[in-house]
């Protein structure tokens, strides 16, 4: 009958509870509020001052077919002509394939609104003048001349520290400018249209209500009901399941579930797993016995006796193999081994003589290294001759008694 929780399991559950509380607190403390995410980035996910969430929702409420674009520009080939592609200050560099895809999108009838200095994404971009360093104050830019894009928007507000277009000619038409040069330009490329802005401040949450910024954005977006794709790919929001979950509390929830599962495995597994006895080294192992016996011989200075034991065993096995008596002289036993086994064993005769002399008078050489070499030599020759150990004597079994016939 089970009673209560085991103390070891209680410690694991307490530790898992503390980790769970820490993860929950981290989810609340470390995850920024929606309005503070992506600070400084004109993304439609941010409701901060520099975000573009307000402009995104306004265009959607007006009736545009608006969606965030979290795929590479190479997928723009699937969009129909007349689609507007908004790039608000791309942060990450583009590849040659992506630039070619945007150029193709424009030339077959698409419209691109680019805010920022990523001019490589534009086909036939105008020449830019130098860019001022550091942040700048907002500045009012007046329309260069009347056009469908500046209708109802005689002036706009943007950051004044952006780049300026150089002297324009031909197909390049300035939209808004100041004394430093045009800060907004439009031109045709193939069957499509390009609108360039020096900064994305015009689309930001803080500036969309300033001057006629919203009117200009509506003019640039085209007729109501048009198809608009607002780029978030170059803001790091790439359209994968993991990046989507990264913007939600899902990772923190998965971490909490992992902690709970780990606690369950540790507690349940420890109590219901197979019971294994602890492994303990026995003090009667063969190695310990050999070391103890060797130490006794060494302290007693009885190396000769140890050699004698090994030599007598070797003579017994060799005599059994050759069919001789164990008391056969060394020379005769050596010659018989050479003749009957059909092989020469150099050094065998000298080793046997030395062992025989040492056995007769153990005090002649009581040297541990010399004794060890002699024992090793005997083991070596025993392996060469394939001498087998003496089989154990079989236990004599008692003969079964014959059943009594009843006769005397």
Image (tube, grey):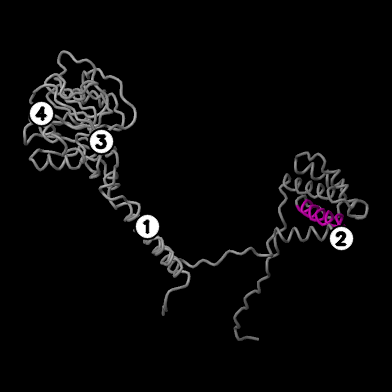
Earlier residue among tags 4 and 1: 1
Q: Residue 133: x, y in percent?
A: 34, 27
Q: Which of 281/343 is in front?
A: 281
Q: Compared with residue 333, is residue 276 higher up or lower down, i.e. above or below?
A: below
Q: Residue at x 36, y 55 (%)?
A: 26
Magenta-colored span: 301-320
Identify the residue under disc 4: 82
Query: Is mark 1 in CB contact (under 8 Å) with mark 2?
Result: no
* Secondary structure at numbered mark 4: loop
Q: Which residue is mark 1?
A: 23
Picture coordinates of residue 56, whole percent (x, y): 16, 40
The reply to whether discs 4 and 2 touch (Cβ–Cβ < 8 Å) is: no
Q: Quadrant of the C terminus?
A: bottom right
Q: Which residue is mark 3?
A: 233
Mark 2 nearby-residue class (10 Å; few <14, some 14–19, many ≥20)? few
> Most extreme residue toward the left, as rendered?
224
């Amino acid at each position: 009958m089970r009673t209560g929780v085991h103390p070891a399991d209680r410690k694991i559950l307490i530790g898992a509870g503390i980790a769970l509380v820490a993860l929950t607190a981290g989810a609340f403390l470390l995850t920024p509020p929606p309005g503070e995410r992506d600070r400084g980035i004109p993304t439609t996910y941010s409701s901060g001052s520099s975000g573009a969430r307000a402009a995104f929702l306004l265009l959607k409420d007006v009736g545009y077919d608006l969606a965030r674009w979290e795929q590479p520009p190479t997928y723009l080939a699937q969009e129909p002509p007349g689609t507007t592609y908004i790039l608000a200050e791309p942060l990450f560099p583009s590849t040659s394939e992506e630039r070619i895809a945007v150029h193709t999108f424009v030339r077959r009838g698409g419209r691109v609104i680019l805010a920022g200095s990523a001019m490589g994404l534009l086909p036939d971009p105008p020449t830019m003048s130098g860019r001022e360093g550091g942040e700048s104050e907002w500045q009012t830019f007046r329309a260069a001349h009347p056009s469908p894009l500046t209708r109802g928007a005689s002036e706009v507000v943007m950051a004044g520290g952006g780049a300026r277009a150089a002297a324009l000619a031909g197909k390049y038409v300035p939209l808004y400018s100041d004394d430093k040069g045009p800060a907004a330009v439009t031109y045709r490329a193939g069957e499509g249209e390009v609108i360039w802005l020096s900064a994305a401040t015009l689309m930001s949450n803080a500036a969309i209500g300033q001057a006629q910024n919203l009117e200009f954005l509506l003019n640039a977006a085209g007729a109501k009901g048009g198809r608009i794709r607002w780029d978030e790919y170059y803001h790091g929001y790439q359209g994968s399941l993991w990046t989507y979950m990264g913007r939600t509390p899902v990772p923190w929830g998965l971490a909490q579930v992992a902690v709970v599962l780990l606690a369950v495995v540790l507690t349940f597994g420890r109590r219901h797993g197979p019971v294994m006895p602890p492994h303990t080294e026995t003090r009667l192992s063969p190695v310990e016995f050999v070391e103890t016996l060797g130490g006794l011989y060494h302290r007693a200075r009885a190396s000769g006796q140890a050699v004698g034991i090994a030599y007598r065993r070797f003579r017994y096995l060799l005599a059994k193999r050759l069919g001789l008596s164990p008391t056969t002289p060394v020379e005769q036993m050596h010659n018989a081994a050479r003749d009957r086994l059909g092989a020469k064993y150099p050094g065998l005769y000298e080793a046997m003589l030395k062992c025989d002399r040492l056995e007769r008078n153990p005090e002649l050489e009581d040297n541990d290294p010399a004794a060890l070499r002699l024992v090793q030599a005997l083991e070596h020759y025993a392996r060469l001759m394939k001498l087998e150990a003496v089989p154990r004597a079989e236990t004599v079994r008692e003969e079964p008694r014959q059943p009594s016939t009843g006769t005397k």
